[in-house]
Amino acid sequence: MRIGRALAASVALIGTAVGAFGGPADASATSAGTGGCLTVSRHRPDARVAIVVKHAGEALVDLRAAAPGTDWAAPNAESVVVSISVDGKYTTDLVVTGAAALHRQLGLGAIGAGRHVLGVHFASERTPATADNARVTIDSLHVTTYTRHDPQYQALRFAPIVYGRNLAETGDQYQNSMDDTPLIAWHERIPASTPGHFVMLYSYVWSNEDGGTGAVPPALMARWGRTTDIEWVYAVELDDRGERVPGRDAYQAGDHQTVPFAGRYEGDHALLQTCTSNNTMCDQVSDPMRFFLSAQQTLPAGQPREHMMDVNPWTYAIMAKEMVREGKIEAPGPTTPATFDVSDERNYLYAVVDKTTQGANDGDDSWIGVALGVRLTSGETVYLSNHGVPLGSIQRDDPAATAIELPPGATVDEIAEVTAYRTVVGTDSGAPVHVTHLGRGFLLDRRYRPGPGVLDWTGDVELTAAAPSAVLWHR
């Protein structure tokens, strides 16, 4: 077996940056932490970090960044934006929000062996935080290069770079610094129709979406179990040598169409731009902001896409705070799960269900869905994921996330049972539905972080027109 060489670059601060990071890293390590701290602000020169790369490859930067005084829920204080460069070449923006330091991983592209300089610039024109002392602090930073011998190399080599959205109806040219901001990315490796070939599929998570299903937040919570937006953005076919097959890459365009990519590349990285209010792509770029998110993570088989939020739990706080700031949740005061409106997202039980519908189920006007119902130990009321609205049911047969609104203050210890309900939209085709798994089952804590999950059921129950419900889990 050939062992890959993911090599940590040695880093040290140079120039006028504040603090000092560690000296040369061990060349055999896959990562190397650094000590010290640097600060960038309106009133400080750019930070410059020396990078010594021992072997050429695709590079990622890992850092922990905070922006004291910012809050994604607060207008005019949402974030501070820093722009990162390598040897003076702009590579990516990073939207930093909140006083708590978050780990972020970003792409830097192909880097040759030798000495380089990573720059961190306070992007005043892109920063919505208006405070005079707005700043970003970075308390750890390291750069890792992945060579052709590393299993992660291909996924990093072809990862797209996504430019920001500048639609007039949703904001100005820097709108992703405060609205629908890209959070995380990942890749999936899928067999291609040509033997020996495979497709590398890349997906992004945005903090929200202003169009599509996102224009009706209750539908997002009921049908998708979140108010973020998750979309695949780019797919590329690779041959048995791991090289791009010419003319066999595509992106997700408006109306969720798959369109052949005809744009430019930066090295092997396709350049795309967010061009719709529900965050689909075009292959001509013009926005000044760009996001080179690391696509190193991958989605495990059998998991819903929302699993990637679960393993990056900080995304839930950004999701919830954007809903608060944009007035997309019920007005303050007593709330009730009886309404379809979205309440405080800490009131929801986040679950996932696996089901299979026998027969075609992709109609626009008629289809069979599934909703989940939760009964608490305190009574007989059943709280439905679709709030009794058939169109809020789950249509797809992939592992599907949903969220069930519970009374404020309810805890997972109060959950008595969870029931699956067959629901009909339009004309009932009579198709039975087999439910085979129920999982997750967590609430968000006070800080909007996922708590422990309590649901873990596997079996096979059939829902029919004659027997449309079945208890899947009970205490």
Image (cartoon, rainbow, N blue to C red):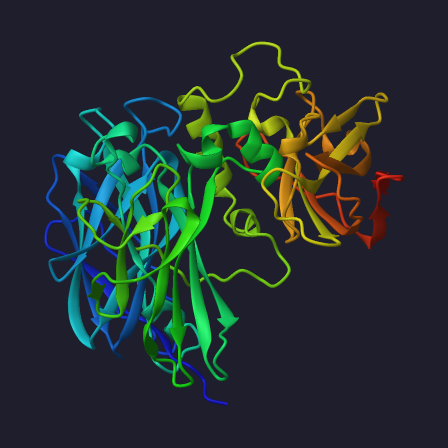
Give residue 263's quadrant in the image.
Answer: bottom left
The image quadrant where one finds the C terminus is top right
* Foreground pick, 305 / 32: 305
Asked if residue 352 is positioned above or below residue 159 in the image, the reply reads above
Asked if residue 258 is positioned above or below residue 422 in the image, the reply reads below
Query: Residue 235 placed where, x, y %?
Result: 40, 64
Q: Is residue 474 visible?
A: no
Asked if residue 467 is positioned above or below residue 439 in the image, the reply reads above
Rendered residue at 64%/39% (across/down) = 402
Rendered residue at 17%/76% (across/down) = 114
Tell which residue pokes out farthest to the right in this image. 466
Query: Residue 146 placed where, x, y %?
Result: 34, 74
Position of residue 261 in the picture relative to residue 353 (left or right): left
Give residue 200's quadrant in the image.
Answer: bottom left
Query: Residue 29 placed where, x, y %?
Result: 39, 74
Tally of marks: 0
Query: Residue 392 placed where, x, y %?
Result: 63, 32
Q: Is residue 437 visible?
A: yes
* Foreground pick, 416 / 390: 390
